[in-house]
Image (cartoon, rainbow, N blue to C red):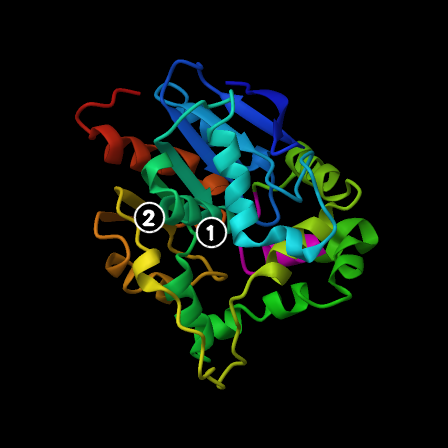
Amino acid sequence: MKGTSHFVQLNGEEFYVQTWGQAHLPKLLMLHGFPEYSGGYADLAPKLAGMYHCIAPDQRGYGQSWAPAEVGAYTTSKLVGDMVALIESDVIGHGPIAVMGHDWGAAVAYGLAMFRPDLVQRLIIANGVHPVPFQTAMAAGGAQSEASQYINFLRSDQAEEVLGADDCAKLLSLFSANMDMGWLQGKTRAAYLTEWQRPGRLRGMINWYKASPLKVANPGQPLENLPQLPREKLMVHCPHLLIWGENDTALLPETTQELEEFAPQLTRTNIANADHWVLHQNPEAVADAILDWVIGPETYIP
């Protein structure tokens, strides 16, 4: 199924949105991460479009959406505010709705569920992390601290220039480090390069990292005296599905330890032979996991 696309004004700024499925169906807001764009859901959304009206925006700083240059424009409250405005726009109209996030999109999806629970009926996360377990893992000085060292590079002054050089060669290598990138070929690869090379987009993308307050320890050097996060305000009270590509080398399983403390209605589903890019590597398994969770395996007929 081919999606449709249009622009929408959110808080006075222009955002690009792709949709799949019929508008009368229940809404599923699908939030991409780094360094993707709304097209990151083009493999999965058609498989859910019989049950959901799937809505995937280019988030702030990405693709064809508004990309302010200032780091301060990328705080969590502003990123979540964009999606609040989208839910309340004519594209969706009201909540609560189902919300899905992958990678950085998970951070915004969690933000919606935690800070605007009136807008989120169900929360689906694919290889993404809740801020408290993630900060704990990155601060420990262990395997996740080592795996997250790329964040320090992305926060550096030279990151934008380095990532964009030689037709985004460094970004492509960062994107695919220790991962199966067989899906990023041909027209798909060309489409990603087009989105990355739009003016100001590399800066916008890395500003998400620069604006984040989360800290990364050096391997073997645990961080001490971290600021205490307000755990009571970071709860997810709606039903929550976590889908995990088991071979992820960017986000390790320790980043989801004790997630049940923050999401008492959590269901976990692991997908073998997939990694961080599970949405592309096995969209069928992801769609089946979502549909089974929502309506049950005996009810859903492909």
In the image, is 54 to the left or to the right of 62?
left
Residue 285 colored in magenta in the image: no
Residue 84 lies left or right of residue 159; in this view the side is left
**Which of the 4 image quarters holds residue 124?**
top left
Please name the amino acid that badge 2 sits on.
Leu
Q: Between marks 2 and 1, how big is the CA–CA gap?
A: 13 Å
Q: Is residue 173 magenta?
A: yes
Q: Residue furthest front?
A: 12
Q: What SS does tag 2 mark? A: strand
Q: Horizontally, is 290 left or right of 90 in the view?
A: left
Name the residue: 46% across, 40% down.
279
Residue 242: image tag: 2
Q: Nearer the viewer, residue 252 or 9?
A: 9
Residue 107 numbered mark, or none: 1
Q: Residue at x 80, y 42 (%)?
A: 199
Residue occupying the point 27% across, 42% down: 238
Magenta residues, start to end: 171-182
Q: Nearer the viewer, residue 280 or 123?
A: 123
Q: Is residue 196 placed above or below 49 in the rendered structure?
A: below
Q: Position of residue 55 (x, y in %)?
A: 49, 27
